[in-house]
């Protein structure tokens, strides 16, 4: 019997038992749909994180004091004060692959206006900070180089601060008002555009940005920076920029060739990788859980096929009597089980596609089906069909035609 | 009986001291204790015997479903005993047409598809040739007008005719019928015998295994088994016509 005939026979067998075939497919349908949905949520989340991070600037570089923390060993505290004014100056003087630079000094605390107060983080930055972050102003203007030189008591605030201190939609009125942060009065010169919450659930609008000189001298009273943020000229030049910054800082810190860096440079791309790999791990866990249902579905198919082989003992006996060899009989049943699991896989992909395109977005989750997950689903279904069809097929092939044909 | 005249004919089946023993626990059951006979082309042979006489075992041997413990069986000149399972499957496919007591048609399958079945396992046939041969065989058994009827839409007699057509479709050396009238009423049984006699006249070799002694009178030769040995092997000099017997039956009454 040629393969085409075998397929015809198997298709007929599946079609002649529509209800039973469908029920044995059901496990595969649900399993594949679950895998597809999990993968699409995983992929979707990854993409949305990527998008968010790239709006923050993929060419963003952050220099932090202290060596990279390895093996959970706490850093020497003195190493945390290694980023100084001289470093910032030299980066500005020698930069080739770096476009914008801003030293950063942070301080958290209460901010007060009139009877209102709120808690927020104060960022001491250079004028280039908004360019690095690609943030826009809604009202007013950024502080100036002049303000930096004078360590002027001016600031730019996020909309949450405006809302808490002045009320909703009072961005206009906020400009020119003096707020007090740790009893230092600061005049608001600009209000930032609202950016909402980031993917870690942090309110990006609950910030105050002031000249770094002002924060260093008047608020934090420190002579070193918490970090220095820069942006590479382009995303492609990120590695060159990291190399350049490393050279500058090492020579400035007079590090010997064998000494480890006393600072760490992280790129946004690297952050993205970390986030992606975390997402991947979560996705894998979800998919593995869903894949177990496929295993159970496979066992279901095997069960049905075993019943089917017993039920069709006479048919098998007849086929053998008229000349079917054991191999041909086993192929017939193997094709049948692959057919069931593949059809189930097809329906499962369709169901999974529908759910992740229409239902998942309704639940407010991002989803995007990776194309390869569909191919993998089909490959897995074929595999399941063969693996779990093997035992029933062998049972059929090993039947004795004499007994099979007289089976009642 | 003229031995020499018989010997000129082609031998389709030859059993040479065929024995078949089964091991059941510590006991050996001797189902066939040395059976020898020849069946010539164009014979209509009934094999009779009470239950336990070795009838079924002999049928399994003749149908190449089983092999002898000792002795040799030649089917159309081919020795069968040492053949592998797959070789025997192929031999059955090319040389034997089976008719079973309970028809054994595939469920939810049309007459013509049922008849095509043996040819599905023969790669020499194209789909078109298969269909043509199946239609021809169905016409031969008088079902040319029921090609696309499914097995559950047919009467017992019609189903058995489909089964006979299926047995004929590969143009076998021998037609093996196992109690082919066992499930049918008297009238339909005679109709079936009429068909077998017609096939016999057309030159088909037929072996009809039955426990019904009446059937022997419609065949050309009768082999009687008892306790795994041949008790009697007689030529029927006076073959009764099944068609006449059918006509003599009381007419079916419609009420």
Image (spheres, coloured by chain):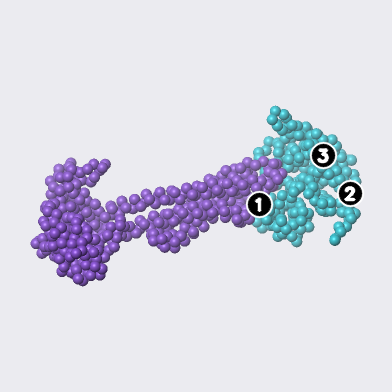
Chain colours: A purple, B cyan
Q: Which mark is residue B120?
A: 1
Of the residues under marks 3 and 1, which one precedes in the sequence? 3
Instruction: Inspect this view and state whether residue A315 appears.
Output: yes
Q: CA distance from mark 3 to mark 1?
A: 35 Å
Whether residue A251 sits left or right of residue B179 in the image: it is left
Residue contact at pointers 3 and 1, CB within 8 angstroms: no
Could you tell me which secondary element the residue under label 3 belongs to? Answer: loop
Q: Residue at x 90, y 54 (%)?
A: B248
Q: Nearer the viewer, mark 3 or mark 1?
A: 3
Could you tell me which secondary element the residue under label 2 belongs to? Answer: loop
Of the residues under marks 1 and 2, which one precedes in the sequence? 1
Residue holding disc 3:
B49
Q: Which mark is residue B188?
A: none
Instruction: Inspect this view and state whether residue B194 appears.
Output: no
Q: Residue at x 85, y 37 (%)?
A: B232
Whether residue A120 sits left or right of residue B212 in the image: it is left
Same chain for marks 1 and 2? yes
Residue holding disc 2:
B240
Give x and y (percent) for residue B254: 85, 60
Q: CA distance from mark 1 to mark 2?
A: 37 Å
């Amino acid at each position: 019997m040629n393969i085409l005939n075998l397929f015809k026979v198997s298709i007929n067998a599946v079609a002649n038992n529509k209800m039973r075939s469908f029920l044995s497919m059901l496990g595969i349908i649900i399993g594949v749909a679950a895998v597809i949905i999990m993968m699409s949520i995983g992929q979707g989340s990854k993409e949305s994180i990527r998008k968010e991070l790239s709006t923050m600037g993929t060419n963003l570089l952050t220099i932090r004091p202290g060596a990279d923390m390895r093996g959970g060993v706490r850093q020497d505290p003195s190493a945390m004060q290694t980023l100084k004014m001289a470093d910032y100056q030299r980066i500005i003087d020698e930069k080739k692959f770096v476009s914008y630079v801003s030293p950063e000094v942070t301080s958290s605390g209460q901010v007060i206006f009139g009877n209102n107060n709120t808690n927020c983080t104060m960022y001491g930055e250079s004028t280039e900070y908004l360019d690095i972050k690609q943030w826009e102003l809604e009202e007013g203007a950024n502080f100036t180089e002049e303000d930096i030189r004078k360590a002027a008591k001016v600031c730019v605030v996020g909309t949450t601060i405006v809302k808490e201190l002045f009320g909703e939609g009072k961005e206009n009125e906020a400009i020119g008002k003096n707020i007090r942060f740790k009893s230092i009065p600061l005049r608001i010169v600009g209000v930032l555009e609202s950016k909402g919450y980031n993917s870690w659930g942090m309110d990006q609008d609950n910030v105050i940005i002031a000249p770094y000189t002002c924060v260093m001298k008047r608020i934090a009273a420190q002579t070193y920076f918490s970090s220095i943020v820069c942006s590479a000229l382009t995303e492609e030049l990120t590695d060159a920029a990291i190399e350049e910054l490393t050279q500058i800082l090492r020579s400035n810190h007079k590090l010997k060739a064998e000494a480890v860096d006393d600072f760490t440079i992280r790129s946004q791309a690297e952050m993205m990788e970390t986030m992606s790999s975390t997402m991947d791990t979560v996705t894998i866990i979800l998919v593995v859980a869903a894949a177990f249902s496929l295993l159970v579905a496979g066992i279901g198919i095997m069960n049905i096929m075993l019943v089917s082989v017993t039920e069709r003992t006479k048919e098998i006996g007849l086929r053998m009597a008229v000349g079917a060899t054991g191999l041909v009989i086993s192929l017939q049943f193997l094709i049948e089980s692959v057919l069931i699991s593949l059809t189930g896989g097809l329906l499962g992909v369709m169901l999974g596609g529908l759910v992740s395109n229409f239902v998942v977005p309704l639940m407010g989750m991002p989803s995007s089906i990776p194309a390869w997950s569909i191919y993998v689903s089909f490959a897995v279904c074929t595999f399941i069909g063969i693996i779990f069809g093997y035992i029933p097929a062998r049972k059929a092939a090993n039947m004795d035609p004499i007994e099979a044909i007289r089976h009642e | 009986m003229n031995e020499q005249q018989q010997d000129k004919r082609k031998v389709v089946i030859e059993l040479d001291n065929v024995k078949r023993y089964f091991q059941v626990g510590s006991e050996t059951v001797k189902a066939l204790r040395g059976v020898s006979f020849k069946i010539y082309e164009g014979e209509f042979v009934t094999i009779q015997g009470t239950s336990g006489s070795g009838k079924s075992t002999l049928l399994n041997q003749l149908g190449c479903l089983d092999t002898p413990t000792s002795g040799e069986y030649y089917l159309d000149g081919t020795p069968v005993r040492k053949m592998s399972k797959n070789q025997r499957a192929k031999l059955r496919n090319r040389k034997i047409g089976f008719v079973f007591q309970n028809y054994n048609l595939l469920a939810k399958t049309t007459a013509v598809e049922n008849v095509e079945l043996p040819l599905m396992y023969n790669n020499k046939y194209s789909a078109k040739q298969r269909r043509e041969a199946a239609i021809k065989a169905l016409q031969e058994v008088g079902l040319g007008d029921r090609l696309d009827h499914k097995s559950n839409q047919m009467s017992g007699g019609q189903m058995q005719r489909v089964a006979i057509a299926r047995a004929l479709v590969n143009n076998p050396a021998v037609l093996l019928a196992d109690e082919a009238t066992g499930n049918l009423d008297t009238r339909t049984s005679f109709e079936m015998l009429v068909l077998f006699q017609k096939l016999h006249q057309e030159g088909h070799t037929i072996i009809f295994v039955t426990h019904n002694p009446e059937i022997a009178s419609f065949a050309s030769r009768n082999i009687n088994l008892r306790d795994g040995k041949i008790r009697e092997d007689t030529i029927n000099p006076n073959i009764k016509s099944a068609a006449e017997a059918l006509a003599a039956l009381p007419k079916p009454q419609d009420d």
